[in-house]
Image (tube, rainbow, N blue to C red):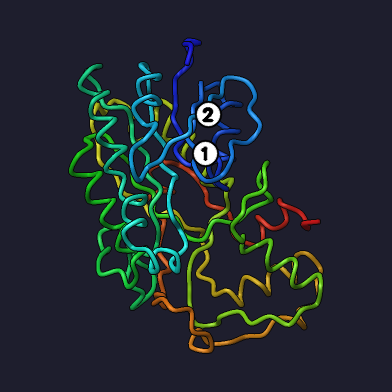
Amino acid sequence: MASSGKPVVLVTGGSGYLGQFLVQALAKANFQVAFTHHSTAAPILRGDVTAYWVDLVSGEGLEQCISSLPSLSAIINTAAISSPGACEKDPDTARAVNVPSKLLDALSVHAGEHGSHPLFIHLSTDQVYDGSRSNWREEEAGNPVNAYGKTKLEAEKLIQERWPNCVILRSSIIYGPQSPTPVSRALFLQFVARQLKEGTPTSFFNDEFRNPVFVDDIVSVVLRLLQPGTVLSGRWACILVYNMGGPERLSRVDMAAKVAEVWGYSPDAIVSAPSSSVNRGVASPADISMTSRKLETELGLRLTPFSEALQQIGRLP
């Protein structure tokens, strides 16, 4: 990757939903961007953006990718197997992808050669909490109820042990407009809009609570972390953990009702149901709502309420 004099940022999982928005925003913000992809083809590239095929399970492609980025300023790790069901069915592969030991190995070689540790921003999950109550705080993680949460908590611990300059962002359900290049996995907001538009009666759980977070807010958080004058300013090494969820504690039926209200759909297709009405084959935490006050205060950001974000997005086609 030829140097342009711009700060170099690597986004792992850059072809995923969040990754695409990050790559796009970073390039627009005058960063030189590299990203990795694996099972999903790389989206169309523009500007100072370079794609690398990488296998995080075997580590194949990592050495070539990292060695091509000698002036690396930051890594944003969005790569993950984020389906709890898929993690439960194949916990070994889930652990290999979600616990980034191969990535840290490659970065450690880079750090030894260049004498510095680029900022490592890791996307974690609210599922590191066990769901036994509401309004979780950062210091209370532990005892996740499924393989996905366990691998993500293990990843947090490994990163903090091995990398002295890191920020861990515990994200809730991510929602927003369609990504620049469509992704294969189902997106909650798009699913709700389709069901309501078609008038298909659909059950939404009324007893599992989270803090859905707008994808634009996540982009703003990352850009703030990469800019001078943030909480990171003047620190060569820091380890920070933030909850990153929207300001509202919502169930899925709450979210569906708000979509109907803001986008003008009939709510008649919304069926309120307990989570016990469906056998998902995987344990799911009941209440992993969390407070993100620490992030908002330290980074000086306001996280967007769900209905306000829906208005910004506009009714999906």
Question: Which circle's residue, 2 or 1, is located before the other in the chain?
Answer: 1
Residue 133's x, y, as percent? 35, 77
Left or right, 166 with respect to 25, comes to left
Q: Residue at x 52, y 29 (%)?
A: 51
* Amino acid bearing label 1: Gly
Helix, strand or loop under label 1: loop
Residue 274's x, y, as percent? 53, 87
- Residues under numbered marks 2 and 1 in contact, where contact means CB atoms less than 8 Å apart: yes
How many numbered marks does the figure carry? 2
Residue 211's x, y, as percent? 49, 64
Nearest the eye: 241 or 193: 193
Check residue 14 in the rendering and tell me which mark sits there, or answer none.
1
Q: Residue at x 59, y 57 (%)?
A: 185
| Quadrant of residue 113 within the rendered picture | top left
Nearest the eye: 168 or 19: 19
| Quadrant of residue 163 within the rendered picture | top left
Residue 23's x, y, as percent? 55, 34
Q: Is residue 77 above or below residue 98?
A: above
Residue annotated with mark 2: 51
Question: Where, quadrant-wise, is the C terminus in this rendering?
Answer: bottom right
